[in-house]
Amino acid sequence: MVSPEFSLSQFSPMAKPRNRSFWCLSDSFLYCGGVFLAILLVCSFWSFFTPTLNFSSAITDPSSAVSCKESGFGVNLKSDPKDLTFYDDPELSYSIEKPVKNWDEKRKQWLNHHPSFAAGASERIVVVTGSQPKPCKNPIGDHLLLRSFKNKVDYCRIHGYDIFYNNLLLHPKMGSYWAKLPVVKAAMLTHPEAEWIWWVDSDALFTDMEFKLPLQRYKNHNLVVHGWPELIYDKKSWTSLNAGVFLIRNCQWSMDLIETWSNMGPISKDYKKWGEIQRSTFKDKLFPESDDQTALIYLLYKHKEKYYDHIYLEGEFYFEGYWVEIFGRYENTTEMYLAIERGAAELRRRHAEKVSEQYGAFREEYLKSAGNGKGSWRRPLITHFTGCQPCNGDHNKMYDGESCWNGMVKALNFADNQVLRKYGFIHPDLLDSSIVSEVPFDYPADEGPW
Ligand SMILES: [Mn+2]
């Protein structure tokens, strides 16, 4: 299971030029590396040696992108100017029951006072997810939740996104599927530096760790959900969109939506009435209580003129996909991707995890014939285990528990393989989480035993 001895015969013909050019660049590489290392050393030792040592010539070099005052991705994590912002307003409340007004101006003012965050703010995403406050009833539930969280942490690390995990009810009445709205509202206020909050359910797993959201496509919209207009307006179905995964712009429009949306939930005095209205409008709805998904569909259905132009119904790829139509295809998809890589040395090249997005962009060239969404062999961005209820174990009777848990394990290992490979290992069997094999150099050019 361990890679064979290093030998020249392992190089594919396509890989050779790459190695040659690497060594041709070695001088300048070493020089730049040396300069970078010197700057890093100054940064790490500055606090110990200042003020007696003078390294000013190194740190004032204008060509250097590294500054000791900055940390993170070029943002200043250590400065909060004294200028007053919305945070200093005693009237501001994070509670779902107290609406926020003039949020666009308030957020803009904060960004003006924090210029290092203003740059790049439009692309910044915070992923928000969570689970219940208490241990899971299902004996393997907490293990599945841990792996589900690891899956999201992996995706966020690869793409440079922040992530917040909530396991409290921020409003005592807003339980189960309603719990996300108070969290998303609070996260918007806590992250004025982020243009987008991306809610991802705990039973939804990233299964394409490379895929990046096409934000450009959503530039004129404030909410993105997986959904289909004909199912809303013609079929009037409560599953015409899925509210378990959504991307919401951090702006006043979204604050207003969350206010209207949550007022169809348990905090409303009309909560019972909303359940009745939903059931009479969307006849396939299975249960009498008002739920967040049907509530959102109701807003789109009833107030199309107000909402439709602002909500992007993403149906082109698996913004989230129903696990039943996906989980049998992971092995085939794995094979298709390996076949591509056998013919593309640039995709096989080992690399640092931090530059993964570059390889995702390379791969796009080879995925043009894969299609997208249903019936495609492309990796689905998110596989959603709706109805599986991993934490309490009360899965929908339509499925047996085995297929739910096996499906989740497969999805987790399928995703993990995309990450683990950069650490030098791989799960050879998607259903066996405990076994890993070392990945040989130039994998998968050689077919064999690994
Ligand atoms: Mn879900």
Image: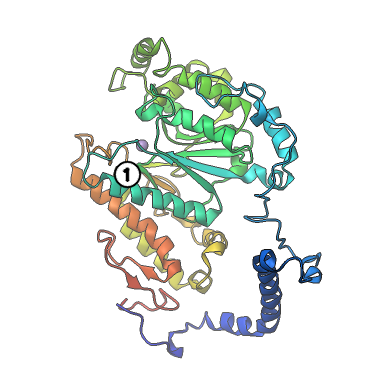
* 392 with respect to 15 (left or right): left
Q: Which residue is mark 1?
A: 323
Vertical position of residue 226 compared to residue 210: above or below:
above
Vertical position of residue 277 compared to residue 217: above or below:
above
Percent of width and height locating residue 87: 64, 31
Quadrant assignment, res 204: top left
Residue lying farthest front? 52
Quadrant assignment, res 358: bottom right
**Mark 1 near ligand 1 (CB under 8 Å)?**
no
Q: Label 1 is placed on what type of residue?
A: Trp
- Circle 1 SS class: helix
Quadrant of the image containing the C terminus: bottom left
Percent of width and height locating residue 189: 58, 32
Instruction: Tell me which image quadrant ligand 1 sits in.
Output: top left
* Towards the viewer: 366 or 412: 412
- Residue 233 in sight: no
Vertical position of residue 448 compared to residue 394: above or below:
below
Residue at the image point whose x is 57% and y is 18% from the top: 305
Percent of width and height locating residue 160: 56, 53
Quadrant of the image containing the N terminus: bottom left
Residue at the image point whose x is 29% and y is 46% from the top: 142
Residue at the image point whose x is 29% and y is 54% from the top: 410
